[in-house]
């Protein structure tokens, strides 16, 4: 009996069912069943593969020819090339993820335009019509080269076939959530559509040697909408983060098979699209007024040192529980730091609302921001300012001790370049007129909060 049949496979434990259900009975996980085609000859295929197959031909790793770096396509945005590990690799599949309205389509149209100077590029959109994209291209000045083509499509089959035609060196697909593969019944944006459409396109890219950039939306929680598998399948995952309205927007690689993940490119959006911020520290500090609650932090964005202002506001709580909010900083970390401040110093914060703001829309993931946040809170609570020429960095432990930060020398060099006169830093052995080491939170507050 050879009937084409589908089965439903749990993506967690691999249990199979003939019918779909919301919950896997075997492992108890919800929403993990995915429809898959069943090969007609079940277990006999496994038996054959035990006997069949040919021996692999392993090579010594040292003798393998490396792919030529010169073949990489430059995006003409130097910082973005660095994030990608030297440009776009032919046959590579990239996923660019970000919130709606952050500028994904804008950035990719600029990249498409830059590469189309030399190579054939195709921009496929399932979200916008040809005239909408043409209008944006005009605004960006991206209409000079006639090697840049556009197609509106939501069919993953058609897009994969187009990639396999080898006509294009780079294909941009905006976005993976709008695509559907004809043989999968579910709606676009569902887990099975994203996985299967993604797979079809990735296979086509590897066969043809064309580079593919997929746009992916993120959910409210900030993770890429759709299955985690997609992140495993692609070669590079780029995260596009920042403020939707003004401020800095940062592109960083969260996964890169061809390069480091510690680089970042910083953009601002203008009328003519996204432009690289040449001197982020100067831009971030341009509007600073030294008031109480304001501290300059020497942080790292990728490998690059950046000076950013941290602001704290401390008010009496008028009703109920004290309120704590943080923009650009982790709220759990803020609560932890407040607890450390209360326990290790004489500050009384249990009846105070505390607000933290990182200026410029940056999201800090740097542990060395701790000391700056603590000093900003203490400065706001006590109504005392810090010295104008002071930058701060260092991780704070639960005992109130200041712990070392990575790349201290680069943070200090950036502060010196921008004309600061002192840096409060973790104890590292180096101390001079510029570098002032502090051992714990109490000492930092006693020595550096001015009356
Ligand atoms: P868009 O690239 O469409 O975002 P995404 O694809 O990530 O959803 O554009 C983001 C915003 O940028 C949009 O609201 C309009 C604005 N914008 C500019 O300010 N200047 C420009 O030159 C362009 C093209 C867009
Ligand atoms: Mg878009």
Image (cartoon, helix red, strand yellow):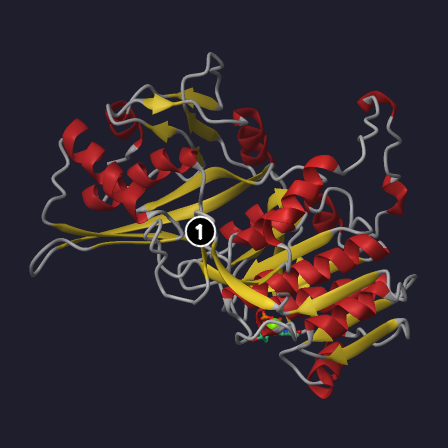
Quarter of the rendering containing residue 304: top right
Residue 130 is situated, as x and y percent measured from the top left of the image, at 73, 85
Q: Residue at x 11, y 44 (%)?
A: 350
Q: Residue at x 30, y 37 (%)?
A: 375
* Residue farthest toward the front in the current orientation of the protein: 1
Residue 30 is situated, as x and y percent measured from the top left of the image, at 35, 59
Q: Residues within 10 Å of mark 1 (few under 14, many from 20)?
A: some
Front residue of this view, candidates 1 and 182: 1
Q: Is residue 337 left or right of residue 318?
A: right
Q: Quadrant of ligand 1?
A: bottom right
Front residue of this view, candidates 433 and 154: 154
Residue 74 is situated, as x and y percent measured from the top left of the image, at 82, 52
Specify the quadrant that holds the N terminus.
bottom right
Specify the quadrant that holds the C terminus.
top left
Quarter of the rendering containing residue 95: bottom right
Q: Residue at x 61, y 67 (%)?
A: 176
Quarter of the rendering containing residue 394: top left
Front residue of this view, candidates 146 and 270: 146
Residue 341 is situated, as x and y percent measured from the top left of the image, at 21, 34
* Residue farthest toward the bottom in the current orientation of the protein: 131
Q: Is residue 140 left or right of residue 443?
A: right
Q: Is residue 89 left or right of residue 297?
A: right
* Residue farthest toward the top in the current orientation of the protein: 429
Q: Which residue position holds label 1?
A: 15
| Secondary-structure class at tag 1 | loop
Residue 344 appears in the rendering:
yes
Q: How many marks?
A: 1
């Amino acid at each position: 009996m050879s009937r084409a049949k589908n089965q439903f496979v749990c993506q967690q434990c691999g249990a199979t069912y003939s019918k779909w259900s919301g919950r896997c009975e075997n492992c108890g996980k919800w929403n993990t069943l995915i429809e898959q085609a069943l090969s007609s000859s079940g277990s006999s295929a496994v038996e054959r593969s035990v006997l069949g197959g040919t021996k692999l031909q392993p090579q010594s790793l040292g003798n393998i020819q490396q792919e030529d770096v010169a073949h990489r396509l430059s995006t003409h945005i130097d910082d973005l090339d660095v994030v990608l590990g030297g440009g776009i690799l032919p046959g590579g599949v990239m996923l660019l993820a970000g919130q709606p309205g952050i500028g994904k389509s804008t950035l990719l149209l600029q990249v498409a335009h830059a590469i189309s100077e030399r190579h054939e590029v195709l921009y496929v959109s399932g979200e916008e019509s040809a005239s909408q994209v043409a209008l944006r291209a005009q605004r960006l000045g991206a209409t000079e080269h006639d090697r840049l083509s556009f197609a509106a499509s939501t069919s993953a089959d058609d897009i994969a076939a187009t990639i396999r035609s080898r006509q294009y060196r780079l294909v941009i697909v905006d976005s993976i959530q709008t695509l559907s593969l004809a043989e999968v019944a579910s709606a676009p944006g569902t887990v099975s559509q994203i996985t299967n459409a993604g797979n079809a396109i990735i296979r086509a890219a590897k066969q043809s040697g064309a580079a593919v950039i997929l746009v992916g939306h993120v959910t409210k929680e900030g993770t890429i909408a759709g299955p985690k598998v997609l992140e495993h399948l692609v070669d590079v995952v780029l995260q596009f983060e920042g403020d939707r309205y003004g401020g800095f927007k940062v592109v960083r690689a969260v996964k890169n098979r061809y390069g480091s993940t510690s680089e970042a490119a910083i953009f601002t959006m203008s009328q003519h699209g996204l432009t690289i911020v040449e001197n982020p520290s100067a831009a971030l500090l341009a509007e600073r007024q030294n008031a109480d609650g304001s501290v300059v932090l020497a942080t790292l964005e990728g490998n690059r040192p950046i000076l950013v202002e941290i602001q704290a506001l401390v008010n009496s709580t008028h009703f109920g529980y004290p309120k704590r909010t943080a923009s650009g900083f982790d709220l759990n970390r803020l609560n932890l730091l407040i607890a450390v401040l209360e326990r290790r110093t004489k500050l009384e914060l249990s009846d105070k609302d505390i607000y933290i703001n990182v200026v410029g829309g940056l999201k800090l993931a740097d542990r060395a921001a701790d000391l700056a946040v603590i000093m900003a809170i203490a400065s706001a609570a006590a109504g005392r300012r810090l010295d104008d020429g002071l930058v701060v960095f260092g991780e704070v432990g639960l005992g109130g001790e200041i712990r070392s930060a990575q790349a201290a020398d680069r943070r200090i060099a950036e502060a010196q370049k921008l004309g600061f006169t002192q840096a409060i830093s973790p104890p590292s052995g180096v101390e001079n007129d510029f570098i002032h080491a502090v051992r714990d939170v109490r000492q930092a507050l006693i020595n550096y909060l001015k009356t």
